[in-house]
Image: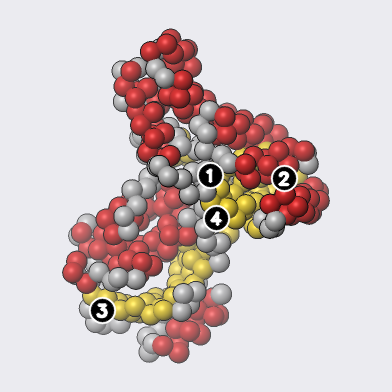
């Protein structure tokens, strides 16, 4: 990929570029906890967006996407926003840096990626983080701190791409470290690194390649449930709620609201349990909590679907250490913690049995916890 990007850059531009990359991400555990003031537990992965970038001594930005085979040129003022959706991510990063008093001048860029699209691995956050990191290095002497770079990516989504996302994806993409997961407190924004470099296990994503389109907005409905329960408990979010507190108000709330809140409260505890287990190197316990998360997402939060439950059952049947839905639900991937000596047999049986039942093979992505945004020497 590096050679391809540099070759393409040379054929289009006169300038001498520097190379930057930023990673996609997984979230091991901690689903639907971010908007409830809880914890998430992501890590950067070995799939990246990579870009060659060089200042061009103009006030214009020229960017070519190898994967989309399209070049876009835009200025750096608000009215210069490009119409191309992928270019808006880059334009938004430029604007958010400028709004914060940073410097961005014209530049040339060529980029490509190997993050599978539509698999819930946050390729858009990787794109934002790659350019935010690069522009900080090229024009700002790296004076913008890394957490601010993640916020610049998040603000880009909000203000230029119409996505009201949390901070987790950009945070993981910028702050990731090889062999470490990060526990991010979504209330205080404090974070801590935990070791994740198992010798005997690996992470395998199984992409069902299905996405169920739902008539209403399931995300908003679940968020509203959580907010209603928190309000009834006199709390700002469910972060400080406990199961005994929830049981005490059970007769005052709907069954649906009760089960939504139950999942969130239990998921908060599961994240903390996984942190403790990793500190001890107890991957069996990590796997146990992953299965419990899947059950909660399927039964209490009701964001699973038949295909994902099938993949989860198949993992359990195959003796896989841990497995759960990853992401918002209703399709997409399961994330699986697999003993290395079981990997080949698991992949074979998943492909065969899923195809027999649903008519197509799932896609398989092994991932390794790796570094986030960086300059490539």
Alpha carbons under labels 2 and 1: distance apart: 23 Å
Identified at 40% across, 42% down, the residue is 216
- Marks 4 and 3, Cα distance to the nearest angstrom? 33 Å
Lateral position of residue 78 relative to residue 127, left or right: left
Q: Is residue 216 left or right of residue 29?
A: left
Q: Which residue is mark 3?
A: 60
Circle 3 SS class: strand
Which numbered marker is on residue 330?
A: 1
Q: Are marks 2 and 1 in contact (CB under 8 Å)?
A: no
Question: Marks 2 and 1: which is nearer the front?
Answer: 1
Question: In front: 377, or 227?
Answer: 227
Q: Mark 1 vs mark 3: which is more N-terminal?
A: 3
Q: Secondary structure at mark 4?
A: loop
SS at badge 1: loop
The location of residue 362, given as percent across then percent down, is 67, 55
The answer for how far apart the CA atoms under marks 4 and 1 are is 12 Å
- Regarding mark 2 in the picture, which secondary structure is present there? strand
Q: Quadrant of residue 181?
A: top right
The answer to whether residue 334 of the structure is visible from this angle is yes
């Amino acid at each position: 990929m590096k050679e391809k990007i540099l070759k393409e850059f040379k054929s289009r531009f006169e300038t001498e570029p520097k190379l930057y990359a930023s990673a996609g991400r997984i979230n091991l555990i901690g689903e639907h906890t971010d908007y409830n003031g809880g914890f998430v537990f992501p890590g950067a992965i070995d799939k990246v967006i990579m870009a060659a970038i060089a200042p061009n001594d103009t006030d214009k930005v020229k960017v070519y996407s190898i994967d989309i085979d399209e070049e876009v040129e835009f200025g750096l003022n608000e009215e210069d926003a490009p119409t191309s959706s992928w270019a808006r991510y880059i334009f938004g990063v430029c604007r958010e840096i400028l709004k914060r008093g940073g410097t961005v001048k014209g530049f040339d860029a060529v980029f490509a990626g190997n993050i599978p699209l539509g698999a819930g691995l946050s390729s858009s956050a990787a794109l934002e983080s790659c350019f935010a990191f690069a522009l900080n290095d090229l024009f700002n002497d790296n004076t913008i701190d890394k957490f601010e770079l993640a916020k610049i990516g998040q603000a880009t989504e909000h203000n230029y791409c119409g996505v009201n996302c949390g901070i987790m994806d950009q945070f993981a993409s910028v702050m990731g470290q090889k062999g470490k997961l990060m526990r991010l407190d979504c209330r205080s924004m404090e974070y801590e690194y935990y070791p994740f470099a198992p010798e005997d296990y690996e992470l395998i994503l199984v992409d069902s390649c299905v996405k169920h389109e739902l008539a209403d907005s399931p995300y908003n409905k679940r968020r509203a449930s959580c907010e209603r329960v928190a309000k009834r408990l006199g709390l700002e979010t469910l972060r400080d709620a406990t199961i005994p507190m929830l049981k005490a108000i059970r007769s005052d709330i709907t069954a649906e609201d009760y089960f939504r809140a139950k999942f969130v409260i239990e998921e908060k505890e599961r994240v903390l349990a996984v942190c403790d287990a990793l500190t001890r190197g107890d991957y069996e316990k990590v796997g146990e909590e992953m299965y419990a998360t899947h059950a909660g997402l399927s039964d209490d939060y009701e964001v699973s679907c038949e295909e994902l439950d099938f993949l989860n059952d198949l993992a359990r049947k195959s003796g896989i250490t841990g497995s759960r839905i990853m992401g918002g639900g209703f399709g997409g991937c399961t994330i699986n913690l697999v003993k290395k000596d079981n990997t080949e047999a698991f992949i074979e049986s998943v492909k065969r049995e899923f195809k027999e039942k649903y008519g197509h093979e799932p896609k398989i992505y092994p991932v390794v916890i790796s570094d986030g945004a960086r300059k490539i020497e």
